[in-house]
Amino acid sequence: MGSITDPGELTELSQPSFDEFQRQTSLMTSCTLLWKELSDHINSLEQNLMKQSETLKRKIETLDSETKASLDSLKKRELSIEDSVKIALRKVEFCAKDAMRTLTDDVEENPDGEVDNGDGLLQHLKSSCLKMEAKEFWNFVTGKKKEIDLLREKVPAALSECIDPARFVMEAISEVFPVDKRDNDGGSDLAWACVLILESLIPVVVDPVIGKSRMLVTPSMKEQAKEIAETWKMSLEERGGIENVKTPDVHTFLQHLVTFGIVKKEDLEFYRKLVVASAWRKQMPKLAVSLGLGDQMPDMIEELISKGQQLDAVHFTYEVGLVDKFPPVPLLKAYLRDAKKAASSILDDPNNTGRASQLAARKEQSALRAVIKCIEDYKLEAEFPPENLKKRLELLEKTKTEKRKTIIVPANKRTRANNGGPMPPAKAGRLANAYVSSFLAPPPFVRSPSHTQYPAAVPGYPSPPPPAMYGSRSPPTNPYAYSPEAAPPPLPGSSPGAPMNYPAYVGYGNGLAPAYQQAYYR
């Protein structure tokens, strides 16, 4: 029978094996964790690669789509050239035939250019356009300012008859734009005609097939339009800069840029200053958008508000759809408050004594009319009822009307007998057909307002000596316009009323011979 191993020895023998087992177990656990991390990392890389692959795939698809759209657009433009040329050729042929008819028709029968209706006006405009007589066209348009609405309707149709509308328009307005070439120190403002003609040119030069994306303006005409714009910009220094240039001139310049499609991105800040300086012009919000200033509109609106131009800011907000950011009603109320403050300052200004109330009322009336129109244009009646504004405007207008009716008669005017009206001036004798006594007139007879007329005549005053004569004409039978005696008894059925009042003489002392109404000598 073998010997029994001592338990202590067993413990010593098994100890190293247990430690080894622990090390192996720990190593396996570390390997497992490392493998898991590595697997997670690989999965993450795979997912990122898939995402990047999808993103790249979408970009490629987008690029392919954009490339296809660009190619289609180029193909469409290429194909449209032939159609546009055909349309232009047909138009030229039609214009040539129409020109030949015009040379022998109504316009030659009416050489003075007198027109009495829209058809006659259009015929005259077409005649100038067909003959490419820009100077005659310009003179005719500028002479019809009172018919500006009719011109706005007919000028585009007339310009469509031109062989080269762009050249024709630039020649027509060259008298005043880019530089006023008139000799009479500028004369009357004709910028309204420039703007009207430039606006009317847009529908004429738009491509009939693809629209505004292509303007039918030849490269040479576009270059000439750019030179005109540069000339106008250089002339600003001579006019004193942006702050001193006239708003109609600014409007013409900006419309010129839009019409010929020559807006420069590097000049956007320059355009912005021009628009803000002339923001009160009705067309400025639309022009600002056409000039590419849509992204700068919020800053421009805030600048207008800070300058006290809240009404202009409202127009800009509606044009670009920023009503939520700039609510119109608070702006309109602030505009009215500022107008009232300005009116009060006018009343307090010692330099405006005598006209202060009139100027202040005019200032407030102008503000009220503008706000009421703005409320009506943008349908703001529910948010800002205009009834109180209209009442205030009516009150101001009524006060103005009453002041106009007030007539102050000077105290040194002589009064006529019986009716208290003014006598003709003593110098009336200068008239060839007038007779005035050189002696003092007898004192007038005045009826008492509390008694009826006397039934019999009151004894008159002694007759004066024969009056002095002026000229060779015989004096009238009755040397006095009115007798100093009492008026005759009233006719039956009549009642004594107020005496007849004659208008006060206001033409004396102006260097002209006074002219009297026949009522003084009946």
Image (tube, rainbow, N blue to C red):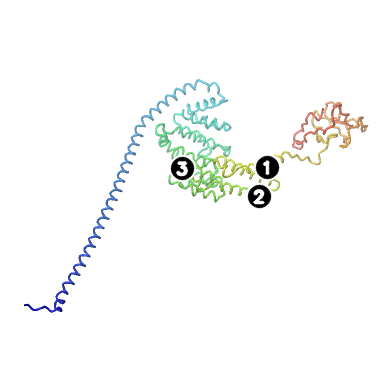
State if disc 1 and disc 3 touch (CB < 8 Å). no
State if disc 2 and disc 3 touch (CB < 8 Å). no
State if disc 2 and disc 1 touch (CB < 8 Å). no
Q: Looking at this rendering, what residue extends furthest in the left direction?
A: 1
Foreground: disc 3 or disc 1: 1
Whether residue 475 is visible here, answered yes or no, is no
- Residue drawn at 32 percent across, 38 percent down: 71
Write down the residue under mark 1: 395
Whether residue 118 is visible here, answered yes or no, is yes
| Mark identifier at residue 344 | 2
In the picture, residue 118 is in which quadrant? Answer: top right
Q: Secondary structure at mark 3?
A: loop
Q: Secondary structure at mark 2?
A: helix
Q: Earlier in the sequence, mark 3 or mark 1?
A: 3
Q: Secondary structure at mark 1?
A: helix
In the picture, residue 418 is in which quadrant? Answer: top right
Q: Earlier in the sequence, mark 3 or mark 2?
A: 3
Q: Earlier in the sequence, mark 1 or mark 2?
A: 2
- Residue drawn at 48 percent across, 45 percent down: 271
Q: Amino acid at mark 1?
A: Leu
- Pick the front one: 344 or 151: 344
- Residue drawn at 25 percent across, 55 percent down: 43
In the picture, residue 87 is in which quadrant? Answer: top left
Q: Amino acid at mark 3?
A: Leu
Real-space CA distance between mark 3 and mark 2, rounded to the nearest whole angstrom: 39 Å
Write down the residue under mark 3: 291
